[in-house]
């Protein structure tokens, strides 16, 4: 983690340097500007209580249409007055009741968000997802394994309105060239 | 295996195998003198809003006696009815404010608690959890971490000192746990059981 963090800081510093240089040239590259923006409030839309309707594909890397459906509630509260947030999920489906939680933290040096997820049945963290917002959409990534093979995981928050948004997870078995839907949740604000 | 879909898949498997009801296979339990106790409510005494007084040894494992003191506030939020909790802290340190969280989670599989920390300055959960269990009203979480270029053992403890007070402390060991130097003590006094949730 220390290495990754250092790398992110170096990248961030390089981006700042590149900005300073290109500002002199009066033509800053748009991607560099995006890296340097302050994203500390990007997840503010998520605060509150939401109804969630979840579909999980049972064999995400195949073409199988087999899926299970769950319905539940997501409660998102602020940490440190809004510099982070924590989310409790509870949902019911064919296998009974399911509970999880996520921690969302903003790294001000890397300008990136991380999501750390934990399920109550396991009671232990694994790694986290890391990424950022762009064009009104959040994409966080991680590497993982599925059935013994290395995959990439992408989590996306999109179609964000004050009263609804969509959360989905996609898996890639080819280094990010193609993605297959694994999990999708449609969230609507609870009254 | 942290992804939600993976965890959901695992949850499905556990439910099918009935592991919810039987946390450990019989063979694993036979090695132990007594069945593992349910520790899922061990942290309940910490729920609420607390005033805090902290003392920290600024240069641990150097022989230094240079302690710094400050006051702070900690809110311990209940998660999943108590099987996890999050201590959200604001410290008014002489060098400037520090915001910290400690997330404590109970594993119904191992019957142990884990603790992970993050600060707002770094904004990322540390990836080495401390692991421990309550004995006689005190929990000691242990892990190994790099410190000043060497691997040391870290102990983080939480214990009650009365109906409206408790303490957390951190200690380091550079000799594999033979001796411990306490380097951070937080003394909490209850303000309210309300957490604003």
Image (cartoon, coloured by chain):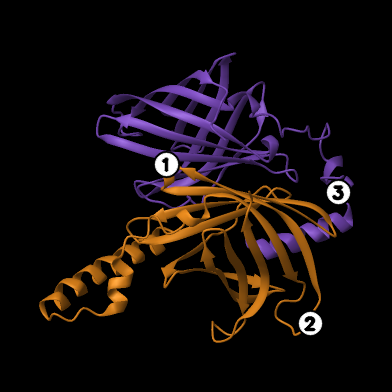
Chain colours: A orange, B purple
Closest to the observer: A188 or B76? A188
Residue receiving disc 1:
A81
* Residue plotted at (66% across, 61% down): B4
The image quarter containing residue B140 is: top right
Q: Nearer the viewer, mark 3 or mark 2?
A: 2
Residue A119: percent from left, percent from top:
68, 52
Instruction: Determine the residue located farthest toward the top in the rendered image.
Output: B162
Label 1 secondary element: helix
Is residue B76 visible in the rendered structure shown here? yes
Q: Which mark is residue A64?
A: 2
Label 2 secondary element: loop
In space, the residues marked 2 and 1 are separated at their CA atoms by 44 Å
Quarter holding the N terminus of chain B is bottom right
Closest to the observer: B23 or B63? B23
Residue B48 in the image: above or below residue A109: above
Residue A49: percent from left, percent from top:
60, 49
Quarter holding the C terminus of chain B is top right
Residue receiving disc 3:
B25
Instruction: Estimate how packed mark 2 is, as few (under 14), some (14 to 19) or many (20 or more) residues with alpha carbons within 10 Å.
Output: few
- Chain letter of the residue beneath label 1 in the structure image: A
In space, the residues marked 1 and 3 are separated at their CA atoms by 44 Å
């Amino acid at each position: 983690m220390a290495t990754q963090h250092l790398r992110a800081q170096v990248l961030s510093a390089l981006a700042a340097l590149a900005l300073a240089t290109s500002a002199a040239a009066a033509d800053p590259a748009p991607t560099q500007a995006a890296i340097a923006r302050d994203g500390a409030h990007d997840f503010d839309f998520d605060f509150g209580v939401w109804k969630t309707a979840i579909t999980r594909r049972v064999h995400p890397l195949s073409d199988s249409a087999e899926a299970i459906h769950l319905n539940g509630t997501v409660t998102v509260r602020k940490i440190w007055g809004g510099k982070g947030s924590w989310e409790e999920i509870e949902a019911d489906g064919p296998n009974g009741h399911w509970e999880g939680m996520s921690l969302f933290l903003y790294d001000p040096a890397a300008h990136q968000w991380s999501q750390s997820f934990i399920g109550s049945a396991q009671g232990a963290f694994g790694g986290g997802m890391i990424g950022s917002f762009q064009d009104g959409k959040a994409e966080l990534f991680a590497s993982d394994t599925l059935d013994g093979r290395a995959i990439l995981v992408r989590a996306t928050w999109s179609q964000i309105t004050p009263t609804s948004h969509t959360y989905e997870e996609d898996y890639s078995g080819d280094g990010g060239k193609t993605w297959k839907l694994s999990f999708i949740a449609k969230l609507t604000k609870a009254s | 295996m942290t992804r939600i879909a993976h965890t959901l898949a695992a949850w499905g498997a556990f439910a099918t195998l009935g592991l919810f009801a039987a946390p450990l296979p019989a063979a694993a339990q036979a090695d132990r003198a007594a069945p593992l106790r349910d520790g899922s409510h061990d942290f309940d005494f910490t729920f609420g809003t607390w005033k805090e007084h902290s003392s920290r040894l600024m240069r641990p494992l150097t022989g230094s006696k240079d302690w710094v003191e400050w006051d702070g506030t900690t809110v311990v939020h209940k998660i999943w009815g108590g099987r996890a909790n999050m201590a959200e802290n604001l410290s008014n340190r002489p060098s400037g404010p520090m915001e910290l969280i400690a997330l404590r989670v109970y594993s119904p599989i191992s019957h142990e608690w884990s603790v992970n920390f993050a600060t707002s300055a770094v904004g990322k959960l540390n990836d080495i959890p401390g692991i421990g269990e309550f004995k006689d009203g005190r929990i000691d979480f242990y892990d190994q971490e790099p410190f000043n270029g060497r691997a040391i053992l870290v102990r983080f403890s939480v214990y009650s000192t009365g109906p409206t007070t408790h303490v957390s402390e951190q200690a380091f060991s550079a000799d594999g746990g033979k001796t411990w130097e306490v380097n951070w003590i937080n003394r909490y006094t209850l303000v309210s059981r309300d957490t604003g949730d």
